[in-house]
Amino acid sequence: MPVTVNERSGLFRIETDNSEYQLMADSYGVLRHLWYGERVGMSMEHLQDYPDIGFSGNIYEAGNDRGYSLDTLPLEYPCGGIGDFRINAVSAVHSDGSFALDLRYDGYSISGGKYIIEGLPAVYADYDEAETLEIFLKDTASDVFVTLKYGVLPKLDIITRCAVIENRGSSDIFLTNAASFCLDMPSDYSEWIHFHGRHTCERLTERRPLLHGIQESSSIRGTSSHQQNPSLILCGKDCTETSGSCIGVLLMYSGNFSARIEYDQLEQIRLVMGINSELFRWELKSGGRFFTPEAVMSYSGAGFELLSHNFHKTIREHVCRGKYKLSERPVLINSWEAAYFDFDDNKILTAAKEAARLGIDMFVLDDGWFGKRNDDRSGLGDWYVNTEKIRYGLDGLSKKIKSFGMDFGLWIEPEMVSEDSWLYRSHPEWAIAVPNRKPTRGRYQLVLDITREDVREYLYNVISGILKSAEISYIKWDMNRSVCDWYSACLENKSMGEMPHRYVLGLYELLERLTSDFPDVLFEGCSGGGGRFDAGMLYYCPQIWCSDDTDAFERTKIQYGTSFFYPVSSIGSHVSAVPNHQTGRSISLKSRCIAAMHGSFGYELDPAALSDAEKAEIITQTERFKKCRGLIHNGKYYRLTDPFDSNLSLWEYVSEDKSEILLQGMQFRAVPNFTKNKIKLRGLDENKNYIVAADEKIYSGKALMSGGILLPEASGDFFAYEIFIAEAK
C-alpha cells in the first residue's frame, strides 16, 4: 500500500517506488511535515529538535515548552494569524473581522484510485494505479474545515496535492489566501530553478541560490503568462542532469498563480504554491466549499533527467486526454506567416494543394477568415465566414482541401472581442471593463467576461456551430492579451477578488464542454504562443503552440526550458520562412526542420514560394518525421547539452525498449581548426550492441554512454545534427 498510518504516533507515510513523503499529527493536533526524499523506511521525526528561538511564540497548549513554535516547525498547511510569521498557505477573514485560522488534525481517510476536483483539471488514474489520502483539519475556534488531498501514483513517483476549504458555520467568511500546498524542507535544497521569459522568449531557465527572505515566481496577468511558468525545481548545489536530489512542482492551473519560497531565519525552506493571493478575495458562504487547483510533485535522487521523465510520462498518460493523447499528430501547415490577413480562397487552395504534394497532412486557416477581419483592429467575436475572402464557405473550402488528401483546421480566439464588431455593438456589457473607467486595450482588443453564463453559452453555440458546419479536424485556440480591469456586474457580492479565478473556471467549463462534444477534433492551445503553456490547458488541449518565435536558434533555448516539465508531444513547433519574421535571421532549411521536430511538427510558410530544391527537401523531412514521430513523442527524452552554456544544443530520444535512438541538435557557431565534437549518449542498454547509421559501425551501449560518439564535422553556423541509432540484431 502506498499510504500507511501509525494511528498511535500519528505518522503518515506515503511511499512511491523511489520516494517517500512523511507527515505527522502530533500530540497537539498540529500537522507537521517530516520528510520528502528517498525511501528511508522509518519516521524522520528525530530530525526535528528545536531550541527556544527568540521572538518565536508558542501555542498555548505547549505550556512552558518554549522550543515548540509554529514559527520554526516544518508544517504541512500553515495558517495566517496564529504565530507562524512565515508565508502561509491559507488565511481568512471571519464575520467578526478577525483573520486567524488554527487548523488541527481531525481524522483521515484512505481510498483506492485518484481523487477528482470539482470544476478543475487534475491528474487522473485507474483505480489500481493510484491511492488517495485525505487529512481532515478543523479550526479551533470556528466551523472552518479543510481537507488536504494527496493523490499517489507510485509507479511514476508522483504525489499530487490540493485542498478543499469548507465553511460549516452560520456566517460567511472571506478567503484571502487558498494555496494548493505547502512544502517545508531543510536547507539541503539551497537552489531553485524557475522558467521566466516574455512574449516570443518563453520558459528560459534560471538557476539561483536561495536568498534569506522571500523569492517568488508569479503572474497576475489572468493567464499563467509568458513571463513566468507555474513550475519550479528545488535542488542542491551539486544537482545535475544525472545526479543529485531535486524536487519538481507543477501547478495545474491557467490563471493568476504564485510560487513563493521563503528561506527563513533557521535556513529552512518553505515553498507555497497556488492561486495568487493578489487580486484574490473569495466569499465562502455558509455551507460553501472552495477547491484549490492541483499541484503535482515528484522527487528525483538522480538529477533533473529522471525528474523530467516522471513529469513527461504523467502528462502524456495521466493529464492529456482523448483521441490524441498518445496517437500520432498530423504534420500541419499554418497560413499565418504565409499570408497574414491578405488571402482569399484561391490563394488558400493553391497553398493547400502544394502542401499536399509535400506530404503535409493538414492545412490550418489562421486569423482573418471571419467577420470584417482584414487587420487586428476589427472582427473578433463575429464568428461567421467572411464570404468576400472565402466564397466557398468553410464547408466548401474544407471539402476541397479534403479532396487533396488533407485535413482542415481553423484558428479562433473566442475569449476576445473587437470594439469594431457586431458582437460588441450588440453586447458591450459582455466586455470586461470597470464602470466609469476606460478599459485597457491589448492588441486593440477587449476581453469577454466568460464568468457570465450567457457569454459562455454564446461562445459554445458559435464554436459548436462552426465545427458542425464543415469538416474541421483541428482548432487552434488563441488568446492574445493579458487581462486587467477586473469587474463583472454578475458577481452577486460585488467582490472582484473572485473574478480572476471564476474566469479560469469559466474557461475550463467551456473547454470541457467542447472537447467532450467534439472528441475527434484536435484542440491546440495558444496564447500569443506560450503565454498559457501549463498542465491545466494540457488537460483539454494535448498540445500547445510553444512560442510565436519560430527562429530555430531561439527555439532550441525555449524548447530546452519547456522540456523540464512538459513532454515533446505537447510542444507545437513549426518550420518557418527565412529571413525569420521575428528575428530576421536566416538558418538552413535542414536546421529549421531539426529544431521543429522537437515537437508536434509543421510548417509556417507559403509552399508556393519555395524553390524546387526546398520542396524536395520538405518531402524528405515530412517522410522522415512520420517515420520517427512515435519515438519522438513517446520515447524517453534526454537533454545532452545546455544551450545557455554551450555552443551545442543536443537532445536524444530513446524508445522504451532501448532499441531505437535518435540524436538531434545544432551547433550554433562554426569553430575553425578544431577536433570534431564528442557527445556521450544516455539511456541505452550497456549490454546491447548498436548500429550508428552515420557510419554503419557497431558499438556497445556501454561504449556509446561512457565514451560517446564523434559528431560529423560542422560546416557553417547553425549546423544541424541528426543521427539514427538502432539495436544490432
Image (cartoon, helix red, strand yellow):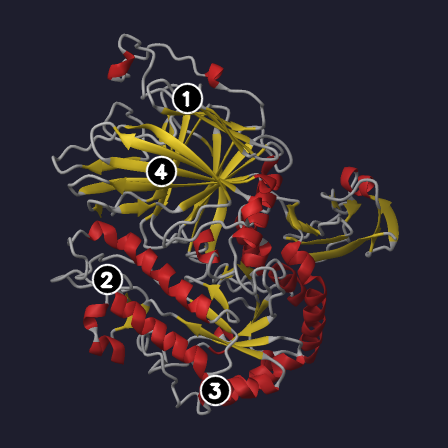
Seen in the picture, residue 483 relative to 98 is either above or below; the reply is below
Mark 3 vs mark 4, foreground winner is: 4
Label 1 sits on a secondary structure element that is loop
Distance of mark 1 from mark 3, alpha carbons? 64 Å
Q: What residue is shown with label 1? A: 267
Within 10 Å of disc 2 (Cα), the crowding (few <14, some 14-19, many 20+) is some
Which amino acid lies under the numbered mark 1 shown in the image of this protein? Glu
Please tell me in which quadrant of the rendered image residue 371 appears. bottom left
Q: In the depicted view, which residue is nearer to us: 336 or 156?
A: 156
Mark 2 vs mark 1, foreground winner is: 1
**Could you tell me which quadrant the N terminus lies in?**
top right
Residue 550 can be seen, yes or no: yes
Q: What residue is shown with label 3? A: 395
Q: What residue is shown with label 4? A: 147
Which amino acid lies under the numbered mark 4 shown in the image of this protein? Thr
| Dot 3 and dot 4 residues touching (CB under 8 Å) | no
Please tell me in which quadrant of the rendered image residue 449 appears. bottom left
Which of the marked residues, 1 or 3, is nearer the chain's N terminus? 1
Which amino acid lies under the numbered mark 3 shown in the image of this protein? Asp
Q: What residue is shown with label 2? A: 440
Q: In the depicted view, which residue is nearer to us: 21 or 149?
A: 149
